Image (cartoon, rainbow, N blue to C red):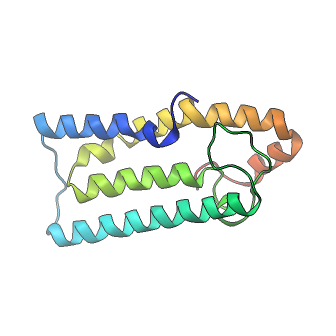
Amino acid sequence: MVAPPPLMILPALLLAEALQWFFPLAFAGRGQSWRLVISAVLAATSIALAAAAIIGMRRVRTPVEPWKPTRHIVTSGAYAVSRNPIYLAFLGLQLAYAWGMANAWGVLLLPLSIGLLYWGVIAREERYLTRRFGDEYVHYTQTVRRWL
């Protein structure tokens, strides 16, 4: 892991803010209230997804922190839909922030965050989990998508 996963979206957010300062790029829309409602729904959904994933991990007594040894593969709840629901929630929070701040750069830079999460965290985790759990993890990767 290059850095703690929540920090992996930070470069894109900082870059989005810098770009917005020098080259403003806002969303076209009918008003601030709809933008804020969409932002709030995205944020709430992302927080709920992360909470469900954390509860699932706690339920089987495996650490949430990716730098601690994994005890069990979680395959139920949020993990039955996505192999990386917490990271997906981080991306959702980035979108919520960008939408709420009317900063289109935050949306356009989403691929940067995805790349940082993938190469900085996910690829390393997947290699570790394959070594640790073997066929059990490989089967899980074949039946559950990485994102959605």
Considering only vertical position in the picture, is 36 above or below 25?
A: below
Q: Nearer the viewer, residue 99 or 2?
A: 2
- In the image, residue 8 lies at what x, y percent? 45, 37
- Residue 80 visible in the snapshot: no
Q: Nearer the viewer, residue 66 or 15?
A: 66
Q: Quadrant of the N terminus?
A: top right
Q: Nearer the viewer, residue 124 or 7?
A: 7
Which residue is located at x 11 percent, y 34 percent? 22
The quarter holding residue 19 reads top left
Q: In the visual, does 41 lie left or right of 25? A: right
Which residue is located at x 47 percent, y 40 percent? 114
Q: Quadrant of the C terminus?
A: bottom right
- Residue 26 visible in the snapshot: yes
The quarter holding residue 135 reads top right
Residue at the outermost top position: 2
Q: In the visual, does 12 lie left or right of 24? A: right
Q: In the visual, does 81 lie left or right of 143? A: left
- In the image, residue 59 lies at what x, y percent? 73, 64
- In the image, residue 97 lies at what x, y percent? 30, 54
Considering only vertical position in the picture, is 41 above or below 96?
A: below
Which residue is located at x 45 percent, y 67 percent? 45
- In the image, residue 42 lies at what x, y percent? 39, 64
Q: In the visual, does 77 lie left or right of 38? A: right
